[in-house]
Amino acid sequence: MNKVVAGAFALMVLSALSAQAESLDELYAKAKTEGALHIYGGGPARLYEGWIKEYEARFPGIKVTITGGYAGGLAPKIDKELAANKVEVDIVTFQAVQEFVRWKKEGVLLPFKMEGYEALDPRFRDPDGAFTPLGVFAIAPAYNTRLLNAEDAPRSAADFLKPQLRGKLITAYPADDDATLFAFYTIVKKYGWGFMDDYMKQQPKFIQGHLGVVRSIGSGESAATFDMMLHHTMVEKSEGKAIDVAFPTDDPLPIWGQPAAIFKASPHPNAARLYLQWYMAKEQQARIGTWSARGDVPPPFGLKPILEYKVANDYAEIFTNQALLLDLRKRFEHYTGEVKTIGGIR
């Protein structure tokens, strides 16, 4: 073995060793000296508050702050921090996987393969550990159980065109919400753009964000939607709300892994690693209320493993195709008009 090969081999060994995940105790010892953690999270900040309290109780001495919002606002905020060399965020998570792919290409993410990385399904994890799938989400039809019987609940896109549902349907704006755009485009790919012409004749309501959708269905203001975060439906149902999921019999469920990442310039990288390793452990993943990307964690609510359903898992391919994405946003906005219900996400 010559010196060049020997040196390269040594570097490979050191790289492999450095990539091995440290234990929670080892990470906590480092994170405690940092004393803080700042998370930017997609959606309302309140969605994270329960986990934050648990984390702070489990690891005293680390104060966590959370900034909620939409990817459309959080991503530019992070880009400005990066450009100014004043990064405030430690962990970011939202559904806009295209931003994580871009940041990885720009070399600003800090790869981290936590304990249990090998248990993550390769169809959801990043091969280099640049970002971590916190959970696997799905969009599925949902309906108000006081307004519709189970046998009358719409389960396919075609069912949503029935005359009795006119004026009783709701979704988020597809041009504004990536998950909703994914759901709409999955339907359009199967049924064609003519579906949108027919759907708009149903006089549907559009609102900003899925929180408004679940509230509208749960209250009975709207009867049904094909644009519901499935875990929101199941949680509301488990709490006794008049809402249920209507699994499609033929149409695919749009699914994606929700990524999270740490930045190389994050001010509290060890607290961020600690959070991810703790949150991605089997004990926590079994309680997240949606499917885990880990193959050793059972599905939630007695459901089947996510990939045993008929699914559309091409979210990343669609949202990293900028030309396609711009065209889709423009076409869907032509149908719905501009967002009119901007009012925060709490």
Image (tube, grey):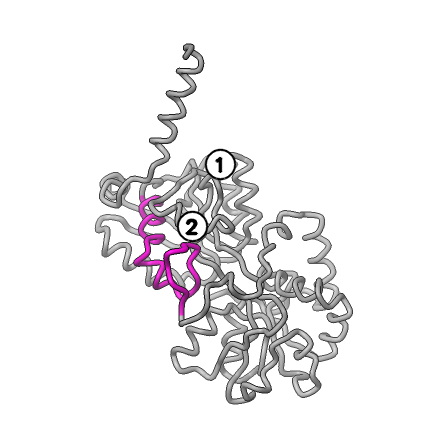
Q: Amino acid at mark 2?
A: Leu
For disc 1, the neighbor class at 10 Å (few under 14, some 14 to 19, many from 20) is: some
Query: Residue 345 versus residue 322: which sits nearer the camera?
Result: 322
Above/below status of 258 relative to 200: above
Q: Is residue 2 left or right of residue 168?
A: left
Q: Amino acid at mark 1?
A: Val
Q: Is residue 287 left or right of residue 131?
A: left
Q: Is residue 285 left or right of residue 338?
A: left
Residue at horizontal 65%, vertical 84%? Answer: 165
Query: Residue 279 versus residue 77: which sits nearer the camera?
Result: 279
Q: Residue furthest front?
A: 1
Q: Is residue 105 magenta?
A: no
Residue at horizontal 36%, vertical 58%? Answer: 285
Mark 2 element type: loop
Q: Single out the mark in the foreground, 2 or 1.
A: 2
Mark 1 element type: loop
Residue at horizontal 40%, vertical 51%? Answer: 39
Q: Position of residue 265 (x, y in %)?
A: 42, 36
Quadrant for residue 239, please give it.
Answer: bottom left
Q: Is residue 292 magenta?
A: yes
Quadrant assignment for the C terminus: bottom left
- Give the mark, 2 or 1, whose residue is nearer the N terminus: 1
Calculate the distance from the C-alpha at mark 2 to the C-alpha at mark 1: 23 Å
In the image, which disc is placed on residue 120?
Answer: 2
Quadrant assignment for the N terminus: top left
Above/below status of 73 relative to 233: above
Q: Position of residue 257 (x, y in %)?
A: 50, 55
Query: Residue 43 versus residue 294: which sits nearer the camera?
Result: 294
Q: Position of residue 43 (x, y in %)?
A: 48, 61
Question: Which residues make up the magenta segment?
Answer: 271-300
In the image, which disc is placed on residue 108?
Answer: 1
